[in-house]
DNA sequence: GTTGACCTTAACGCAACGTAAGGGTGTATA
DNA sequence: TATACACCCTTACGTTGCGTTAAGGTCAAC
């Protein structure tokens, strides 16, 4: 079966403009152009479009979708299974929101009073969700599902006061790290204070602290470009510097 | 409790920019400005923001949110209940998508085959959803839940061929109506043909046709600005003209 | 009295399209 | 054979809901 833009658009429930746009950005090229330059789509393109829409439905950006679908070892079934899992997750989030609305209705009707913090509970869960979207798959691969769930739960359980403390800690840590880098010495006092602040910070997210895990995570900061970029915003080379400092702090992999 | 932009933003999990933007478009004004022009939010604004975020979570545009929240007889609890219903709806849609993914996985593994139409099933439901978002609440209020559900179900059950027929019918109807308006006579042959096409069109969405309902719906086209605007795009005065034509067609409220 | 963390407005940037504008194509029908 | 009409094309500017500098006031603390 061959489709022109409009036919395919009707089949899939998107606009012709969307298909042209996807062509323009190279996300979904037509199988061929006819003599007059019309876009002609075939069976493969139908399948590809279906996938694109699935990913889109999951909230991924088109660029990310393109990246995922073009990776050489792209395992379709595995990817679908992963998204199946995410959809289940999202349904859970929806349930939370539904509960939240029900509670709100009840409070409007005067039966329960809600604190300011409670009012935003559903949204806080969303923060966790967004984080999941960014780092979830990799984090799970590295640490296993149980660890990640525990971390998420800890964030959800935080009071606003604790949230504020975490933010303060983050700020302190950033400042201290920046100061420490000026000294250039990852073994110095400032650097060790930064490492300690980093440990404190981690303890807000981990159910238990270990030196090994701490050393592991800063190693990841160096290995994973996204983390590197994040820390390098504080100052170029920050991820590297932090790793050196934490290795000394934990006493693991003592350099000679 | 009083909040500055950043404090409130942290409480609610949004950015300060978002709060300033909401102020800018008049969606959420601070309770007052302090002597230096700082925005100061109070308890009422916290509540209002919570509502805004709830609506936003439901996928409503900010303009629509403002409209809903500013209508004079705005019944908060009723609105919340309406959204509660929509959330349940959305969960159903998610379930549909999950089913679709499961089917896709199965088909990738070679156990079943999917038709091109099936591949987009979950997404077609989204069309219905979007429609719901626009007109759902009012439609339900006017016709009751059962009628609306039935209509949605009919759309979902449509084959692509039927969808195409509907579109053809829509085009025919638009053209005929336009022609009819040139004659200026809502009782004329062309106008009556337009009315008949309109009846046919309705039959794709209604589980049963009645002259009374037909007359009622064209009256609504005139009363409801959004419909009026839609039909007036065909030609100014189209909604009015169609109403006259259909009243003659159905023989209801015969004018003298 | 000077940091540093807040606040302000103004303005441009962004994704993912929607929406004309201006023009070619193709086929059915008068 | 002409012409109508439903398609198709590219180009390009508009939209939503903010993110992100830029350029500059405010204020509590050291």
Image: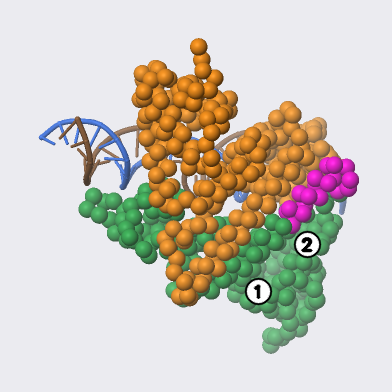
Chain colours: A green, B orange, C brown, D blue
Magenta range is: A96-114
Nearest the eye: B161 or A117: B161
Circle 1 chain: A
Magenta stretch containing residue A54, yes or no? no
* Same chain assignment for discs 2 and 1: yes
Q: Which residue is mark 2?
A: A156
One can see residue B9 in this view: yes
Could you tell whether A47 is left or right of A115 in the image?
left
Q: Residue furthest top?
A: B256
Question: Residue at horizontal 60%, vertical 42%?
Answer: B148
| Chief SS of the magenta region | helix
Nearest the eye: A128 or A231: A128
Q: Position of residue C26 (x, y in %)?
A: 22, 46
Mark 1 neighbour class, 10 Å CA radius: few under 14, some 14 to 19, many 20 or more: some
Nearest the eye: A18 or A151: A18
What secondary structure is found at the residue carrying circle 1?
helix
Q: Position of residue A107 (x, y in %)?
A: 85, 45
Residue B36 lies in quadrant: top right
Could you tell whether A115 is left or right of B117 in the image?
right
**Looking at the image, do the residues carrying marks 2 and 1 touch, with CB atoms under 8 Å apart?**
no
Q: Position of residue A193 (x, y in %)?
A: 79, 70
Q: Position of residue C17 (x, y in %)?
A: 47, 46
Q: Which residue is mark 1?
A: A140
One can see residue A9 in this view: no
Residue B116 lies in quadrant: bottom left
Nearest the eye: A248 or A76: A76
Circle 2 chain: A
Whether residue A29 is situated above or below residue B189 in the rendered picture: below
């Amino acid at each position: 079966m061959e489709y022109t833009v409009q036919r395919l658009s009707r089949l899939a429930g998107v606009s012709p403009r969307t298909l042209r746009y996807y062509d323009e950005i190279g996300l979904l090229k037509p199988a061929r152009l006819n003599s007059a330059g019309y876009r002609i789509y075939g069976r493969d393109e139908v399948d590809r479009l279906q996938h694109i829409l699935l990913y889109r439905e999951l909230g991924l950006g088109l660029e990310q979708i393109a990246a995922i679908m073009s990776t050489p070892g792209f395992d379709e079934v595995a990817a679908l299974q992963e998204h199946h899992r995410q959809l289940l997750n999202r349904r859970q989030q929806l349930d939370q929101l539904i509960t939240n609305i029900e509670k709100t209705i009840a409070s409007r009707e005067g039966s329960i009073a809600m604190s300011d913090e409670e009012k935003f509970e559903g949204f806080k869960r969303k923060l966790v969700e967004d984080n999941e979207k960014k780092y979830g798959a990799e984090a799970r691969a590295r640490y296993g599902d149980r660890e990640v769930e525990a971390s998420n739960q800890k964030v959800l359980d935080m009071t606003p006061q604790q949230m504020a403390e975490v933010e303060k800690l983050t700020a302190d840590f950033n400042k201290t790290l920046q100061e420490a880098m000026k000294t250039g010495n990852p073994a110095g006092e400032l650097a060790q204070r930064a490492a300690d602040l980093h440990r404190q910070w981690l303890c807000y997210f981990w159910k238990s602290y270990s030196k090994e895990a701490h050393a592991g995570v800063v190693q990841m900061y160096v290995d994973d470009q996204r983390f590197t970029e994040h820390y390098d915003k504080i100052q170029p080379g920050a991820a590297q510097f932090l790793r050196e400092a934490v290795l000394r702090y934990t006493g693991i992999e003592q350099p000679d």
